């Protein structure tokens, strides 16, 4: 039987601490301890070791911890051919949509309990929302998250904490219509429309969204924008499904 203070358990605790930062950029020691179920002294000991190897950094002003540069270096070494190919196919279509409406167009992939932004074509308007490539966001809020959830099974949605029974009808409608809408869910005054990118078997590969201030979407251009992104989603799906086999 494995001892509680075994080297394996120490590694598990360190990973649990790092996973805390998946949905929050900075945290104080007490919050990290509460999230992991560790005592403050144990969490501090592991955080100190992670600091020594540049996996986390402590801000001396506000005493909050955030991820360090070592993880960035490691991430750069992770093979990302699937995302590169997806971006190669999707970005030209995203640029066309961006140029037509001058709104933010973004590409998201499912990543555990989050959606990961892997590409973004930004609006040139002054009033817009900035979402950095590489950031993760809650699946429950926003049009792209709804699209991703709609292609999960009920068991998968429960696993990521989005399994409320009343949402099943909503997800069924999104999957059938091929489009999801968000109005003020992630941020007040922000509107989004998203569609899925599907493989040959109808499985979700990614979600593409177009977003901007509600005032520029909730008007007589809404239906036009919906049809435009639906058509773009179909074209990206077609190109993905018919890409040359590697």
Image (cartoon, helix red, strand yellow):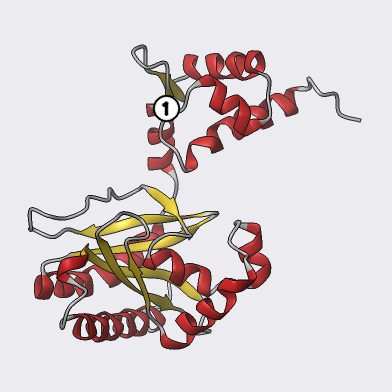
Tell which residue pokes out farthest to the right in this image.
1
Q: Residue at x 42, y 30 (%)?
A: 26
- Residue 95 location, quadrant: bottom left
- The percent coordinates of residue 34 (x first, y second) are 62, 29
Which residue in the protein does label 1 denote?
66
Q: Residue at x 60, y 57 (%)?
A: 160
- The percent coordinates of residue 90 (x first, y second) are 28, 71
- The percent coordinates of residue 67 (x first, y second) are 43, 29
- Quick check: 82 above or below 42? below
- Quick check: 119 above or below 91? above
Nearest to the observer: residue 81 or residue 49: 49
Give the quarter of the figure containing the C terminus.
bottom left
- The percent coordinates of residue 218 (x first, y second) are 21, 74
From the viewer's perspective, tell me whether residue 54 is left or right of residue 213: right
Q: Secondary structure at mark 1?
A: strand
From the viewer's perspective, tell me whether residue 183 is left or right of residue 4: left
For label 1, count other residues whose C-alpha is less than 10 Å away and answer few (under 14), some (14-19) or many (20+): many
From the viewer's perspective, tell me whether residue 229 is left or right of residue 138: left
Q: Residue at x 55, y 15 (%)?
A: 49
Nearest to the observer: residue 22 or residue 212: 212
Give the quarter of the figure containing the N terminus.
top right
Q: How many numbered discs? A: 1
């Amino acid at each position: 039987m494995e001892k509680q203070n075994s080297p394996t358990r120490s590694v598990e605790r360190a990973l649990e601490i790092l996973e805390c930062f998946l949905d929050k950029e900075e945290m104080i020691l007490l919050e990290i301890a509460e999230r992991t179920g560790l005592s403050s002294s144990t969490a501090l000991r592991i955080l100190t070791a992670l600091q020594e190897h540049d996996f986390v950094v402590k801000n001396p002003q506000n005493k909050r911890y955030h991820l360090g540069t070592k993880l960035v270096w490691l991430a750069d070494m992770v093979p990302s051919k699937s995302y590169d190919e997806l971006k190669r196919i999707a970005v030209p279509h995203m640029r066309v949509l961006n140029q037509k409406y001058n709104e933010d167009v973004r590409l998201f992939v499912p990543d555990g309990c989050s959606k990961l932004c892997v590409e973004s074509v930004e609006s040139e308007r002054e009033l817009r929302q900035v979402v950095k490539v590489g950031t993760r966001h809650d699946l429950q809020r926003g049009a792209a998250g709804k699209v991703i959830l709609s292609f999960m099974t009920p068991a998968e949605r429960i696993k990521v904490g989005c399994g409320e029974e009343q949402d099943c009808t909503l997800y069924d409608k999104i999957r059938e219509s091929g489009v999801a809408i968000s109005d003020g869910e992630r941020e007040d005054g922000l509107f989004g429309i998203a569609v899925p990118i599907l493989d040959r078997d109808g499985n979700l590969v990614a979600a593409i969204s177009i977003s901007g201030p509600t005032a520029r979407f909730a008007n007589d251009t809404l239906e036009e924008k919906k049809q435009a992104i639906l058509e773009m989603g179909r074209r990206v799906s077609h190109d993905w499904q018919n890409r040359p086999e590697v």
